[in-house]
Amino acid sequence: MIAVLQWTTLAVCALVAVLRVPSALRGENRSLFGIFALATFAIMLSINAIYLPVDAWLGSENYANLILRFLIYGVVLLAGYKIAKGFDAQRSIWLIAGPVGLTVLALVTVATVVPFLLANTAGSSTGLGTLPDQSANNVDLIKLYTVAGRFYPSFVAACLLPATMRTMRSGLPRLPRSGAAVLAVGASAMILLSLSDLLPRHLAYLQYFISSTAILGLVLGLTLMWLSRVLAAKRLVRR
Amino acid sequence: MPLPAKAFQLWLHGVAPTASTADICRISGIKRTTLAQQLVRGKVAETTLVSISRALKRSPLEDLASFDSFAELAGQPQPPTPAELVSQIATMDLLRSVISRSSPAYGGFGDDSSRLTPALSPAPHATSVRNWVDAIDDGELRHRVSAATGVAPQNYSAQLTANRLSPELAVATARAAGVGFTGGLVATGLLTEHEAGWAPEARQAALDALSDGELTALAGERLQSLGRTLRRQEQEHEQTKKIWENLG
């Protein structure tokens, strides 16, 4: 069930990335292609069947997970900045890419790298849930690493949510508005993901749904914006 | 609430007993699928009835009045007030009239204006619904309509902004304002002025009766709200362009 969900998410993301190749070659908004491609790689590294061979190749020390974290930070930073700029939300741009945002990113980077290096991460484990070394100290370090990894996307999502909601309720054409609505769903899911560690153990599988919703919300929301531009251009040509 | 399908079919059988559904659709220009869907759902749109009635060369107003929910329309209709008539004149026609009344030095015709300016464009116009409600509003009208019909004030306002009003709400609005029932039906474009029983020159006469001061003030108000609408549209256009530049 979870595997199906993950592979579907991957397929959607990869499809959008591939569809975006021609416009990237034409030089239209290359960063959007970057967002889709990075997101595709990130999803690949969260799937067991891909993570294990990649990590084995990297020495089975779970460096693949560290790479995954930074892929996610890259997607979130890039997407957050472009969305905030697209919605003309000066405050969000300032919070994400201004001094505040860069400070947060630096702190998160430290809080990601340091615990990872201090912890004993030997033995490949997707999502680091079943590391062989389960000593209290190691578990705490990994916990800190995970919290930092979830915090940054939530931070960016929280910065975007007001602007996204405003666009959703505005009088803009229907497609950009529905794109904003889908983005808002994705952002909400990203915020929820930070809180999902509080879920009771038997509901922990919901995390997978929440993270899929977050990434699909982001990718499909951006796709709707793109589609609205394409359709509007077509309408113009026909006239 | 649109018209109940049962009552509609009864009416249709009464007015065109021999016509098939295909005939009715052909002469009235309604798509067969549209009519079929409305009949299946049990609710027939008032516009459907009006189109058919028109095609059969009957009086849409009387046919509408034969349904229970529009029974108030029956009998001698109360004529529209001068304010209602003026509200159904397009903003550009009002402006043209302002210029026509000006001295020849400014391209006007002076006192002879109404005979020489081109005829008014037929109702409804781009903001006719809101202008109609504004013309009959005593300040509390929206509250009374929403209390009487249970439609939330913001939904009512949204309909006005979109230059729409369901026929049922149009009648309810007229009732709450104590004016004739035809004003709203003309403003929403359901009926033409002629079908509503308005005199052919009624709007022009109401316009001519306005003093220069009244006309200019009214045209000014209209122009101001048109300016607001256009500015908002321009802003939205800019926003959309920005989204496409960054995310398209």
Image (cartoon, coloured by chain):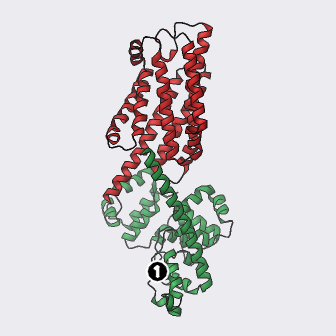
Chain colours: A red, B green
Q: Mark 1 is on which residue type?
A: Leu
Rendered position, B212 above or below B182: below
Q: Nearer the viewer, residue B143 or B3?
A: B143
Q: Nearer the viewer, residue B147 or A157?
A: A157
User: Is residue A179 visible to us here?
Assistant: yes
Which residue is drawn at the image coordinates 39% and 70% (left, top)? B54
Residue B138: x %, y % from top left: 68, 70
Determine which quarter of the picture holds residue A8.
top left
Instruction: Measuring from the top left, give residue B59's x and y in whole percent.
Output: 44, 73
Return the x and y of residue B68 as percentages of the image width and height. 53, 63
The reply to whether residue B76 is in sight is: no
x then y, percent, for residue A205: 52, 21
Q: For mark 1, what is the residue? A: B120
Q: Nearer the viewer, residue A8 or A59?
A: A59
| Snapshot quadrant of residue B82 | bottom right
- Residue at the location (55% across, 86% down)? B208
Label 1 chain ID:
B
Q: Is disc 1 surrounded by few (<14), some (14 to 19) or many (20+) residues within 10 Å?
A: some
Report the residue at 55% width, 78% height from top.
Answer: B85
Quadrant of the snapshot with the N terminus of chain A = top left
Frontmost residue, A129 versus A207: A129
Asked if A130 appears above or below A156 in the picture, the reply is above
In what quadrant of the picture does the C terminus of chain A appear? bottom left
Secondary structure category for the residue under label 1: loop
Left or right, residue B194 beside residue B20: right
Exactly how many numbered labels are in the figure? 1
